[in-house]
């Protein structure tokens, strides 16, 4: 093992492409200088393609949670009835933010590892006509579940006047997000996941319906005031000091997306998901999610005959391969593999090979090469 070599396979932060690292080394510039305006002018149309929206996208210096809080505080007022769909840790976070802003929070709690049943949402909305907003995570990072966002949007808009607000932090850039076509009212993402950047930027895209609500909202806010960001982005600026180095990196990321083609980006993530899942099936190790709702960006594994944290420790010590553990009620029960952003099928073959060795070292009875063979079969089909 080389001391400086780390194989980061967690669902964020994710590895940074070398060209993006180089772009972020650009000499510092004044955040009110013309060069910054020109940089934002380049970024805006390319970023809209990732969200598939014609609306302006607010770029905030902050974590993804800052974007989630901005969504809540700009679109709701104390006492508003809202629905939060909780499929894991980050659905819980949305609920906690809503409670902090004194909203009347209703919840649909889903067994962790499962996607929400759209019929449950439809029935709930029919019985609660006063709901102002519905909050959900697109990819629930803590479980590896991908919720049916397009179908949810149709149901929400058919059965209510509520805004549909989506946490897309571990989805946007790795999973197709047709914001305008699907009728998503507000989408939030962060820089450190499929967008292949360090932590530090959050992006908030709002629909025309959402802007109508935001403009009428009189709740006091300052740094997270989305109207400030929209006013400034229209003139190629930001209301507060931006993360300039990350903006240089973002511009390079968006150029990489254009070169690869977004459809190819999404297909690559689907391929890595299938390779990873087939390897674990070959080892007869249970997966937390069903194939039908499995995320293309993160896979969760729930072993029944070995300690997941022991495996994580083994591959970290022996190969510097970093996997993620479980959170909250899943702590010590699962481990998670991130396959998003700057990650390719060849990286997944390496990851599976090292996990296979780690399994043997921790006492799991697997045939060496069986996981790799299963993943190779998936990859070979795609190559043909």
Image (cartoon, rainbow, N blue to C red):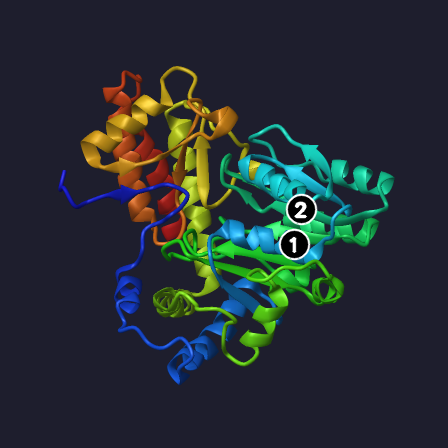
> Is residue 192 found left or right of 104 in the rendered image?
left
Is the residue marked by circle 1 packed among few (<14), some (14-19), or many (20+) residues within 10 Å?
A: many
Q: Is residue 259 above or below residue 91?
A: below
Q: How many marks?
A: 2
**Looking at the picture, how far across and down is residue 44, in whole percent?**
50, 73
Residue 358 appearing in the image: yes
Residue ID at (23%, 21%): 361
**Looking at the picture, how far across and down is residue 37, in whole percent?**
44, 80
Q: Residue placed farthest to the bottom in the image?
A: 34
> Is residue 382 found left or right of 91 in the rendered image?
left
Residue 296: which disc? none
Q: Secondary structure at mark 2?
A: loop
Image quadrant containing the N terminus: top left
Marks 2 and 1 close (CB-CB < 8 Å): yes
Q: Secondary structure at mark 1?
A: helix
Q: Is residue 296 above or below residue 277?
A: below
For label 1, the residue is: 73
Residue ID at (56%, 67%): 57
Residue ID at (60%, 39%): 91
**Looking at the picture, how far across and down is residue 198, in whole percent?**
36, 55
For label 2, the residue is: 101
> Is residue 102 found left or right of 176 in the rendered image?
right
Figure quadrant of residue 379: top left
């Amino acid at each position: 093992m080389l001391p400086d070599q780390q194989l980061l396979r967690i669902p964020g932060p994710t590895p940074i492409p070398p060209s993006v690292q180089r772009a972020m080394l650009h000499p510092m510039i004044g955040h009110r200088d013309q060069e910054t305006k020109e940089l934002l002018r380049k970024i805006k149309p390319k970023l809209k393609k990732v969200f598939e929206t014609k609306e302006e996208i607010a770029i905030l210096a902050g974590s993804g949670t800052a974007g989630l809080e901005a969504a809540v505080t700009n679109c709701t007022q104390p006492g508003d009835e809202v629905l939060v769909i909780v499929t894991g840790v980050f659905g819980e976070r949305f609920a906690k933010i809503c409670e902090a802003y004194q909203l009347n929070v209703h919840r649909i709690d889903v067994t962790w590892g499962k996607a929400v049943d759209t019929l449950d949402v439809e029935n709930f909305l029919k019985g609660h006509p006063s709901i102002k907003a519905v909050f959900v995570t697109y990819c629930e990072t803590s479980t590896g579940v991908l919720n049916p966002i397009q179908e949810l949007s149709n149901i929400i808009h058919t059965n209510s006047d509520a805004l549909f607000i989506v946490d897309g932090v571990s989805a946007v850039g790795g999973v197709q997000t047709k914001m305008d076509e699907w009728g998503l009212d507000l989408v939030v993402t962060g820089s450190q996941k499929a967008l292949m950047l360090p932590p530090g930027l959050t992006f908030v895209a709002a629909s025309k319906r959402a802007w109508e609500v935001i403009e009428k909202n009189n709740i006091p806010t300052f740094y997270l005031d989305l109207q400030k960001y929209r006013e400034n982005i229209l003139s190629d600026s930001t209301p507060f000091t931006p993360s300039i180095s990350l903006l240089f990196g973002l511009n390079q990321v968006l150029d990489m997306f254009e070169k690869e083609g977004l459809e190819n980006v999404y297909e690559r993530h689907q391929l890595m998901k299938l390779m990873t899942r087939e390897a674990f099936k070959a080892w007869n190790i249970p997966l937390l999610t069903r194939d039908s709702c499995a995320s293309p960006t993160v896979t969760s594994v729930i072993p029944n005959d070995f300690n997941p944290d022991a495996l994580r420790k083994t591959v970290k010590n022996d190969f510097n391969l970093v996997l993620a553990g479980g959170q909250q009620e899943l702590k010590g029960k699962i481990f998670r593999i991130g396959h998003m952003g700057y990650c390719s099928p060849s990286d997944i073959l390496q990851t599976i090979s090292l996990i296979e060795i780690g399994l043997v070292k921790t006492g799991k009875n697997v045939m060496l090469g069986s996981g790799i063979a299963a993943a190779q079969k998936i990859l070979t089909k795609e190559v043909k």
